[in-house]
Amino acid sequence: MSRRGLILMTLLLLAACNSGNTPPDLVKTQREAMEKSKKVEQVLQQSVDKKREQEEQQK
């Protein structure tokens, strides 16, 4: 490949990389699912703590 062709290819690649288009958020659904599961975990932990507290009060 000639030097001129190599320079042209490099410039084209740089132009394509700097097009300004933001890439799609590939892990958005996974992140949302993780946030939901953390909320569910908190609710379950609160329920367990409340149940333990009630059992201790009955003793």
Image (cartoon, rainbow, N blue to C red):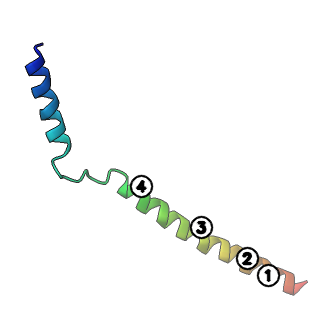
Looking at the rendered structure, which numbered label has been put on residue 53?
Answer: 1
Residue mark closest to the camera, 4 vs 2? 4
The span from disc 1 to disc 4 (Cα, nearest Å) is 34 Å
Residue type pointed to by label 4: Gln
Residue mark closest to the camera, 4 vs 3? 4
Residues under numbered marks 1 and 4 in contact, where contact means CB atoms less than 8 Å apart: no
Residue tagged 4: 30
The span from disc 2 to disc 3 (Cα, nearest Å) is 12 Å
> How many residues crowd around disc 2 within 10 Å: few (fewer than 14), some, or many (20 or more)?
few
Vertical position of residue 44 compared to residue 21: above or below? below
SS label for mark 1: helix
The span from disc 4 to disc 3 (Cα, nearest Å) is 16 Å
Vertical position of residue 48 compared to residue 22: above or below? below
- Which residue of the protein is positioned furthest toward the right in this rendering? 59
> How many residues crowd around disc 1 within 10 Å: few (fewer than 14), some, or many (20 or more)?
few
Q: Looking at this view, is 16 or 39 the one in front? A: 16
Residue tagged 3: 41
SS label for mark 2: helix
Vertical position of residue 34 compared to residue 45: above or below? above
Residue tagged 2: 49
Please tell me which of labels 4 and 2 falls first in the chain. Answer: 4
SS label for mark 3: helix
Please tell me which of labels 4 and 3 falls first in the chain. Answer: 4
| Left or right: 31 as drawn, with respect to 11 | right
What residue do we see at 55% from left, 65% from top? 38
What residue do we see at 36% from left, 57% from top? 28
Residue type pointed to by label 2: Asp
Q: Quadrant of residue 40?
A: bottom right
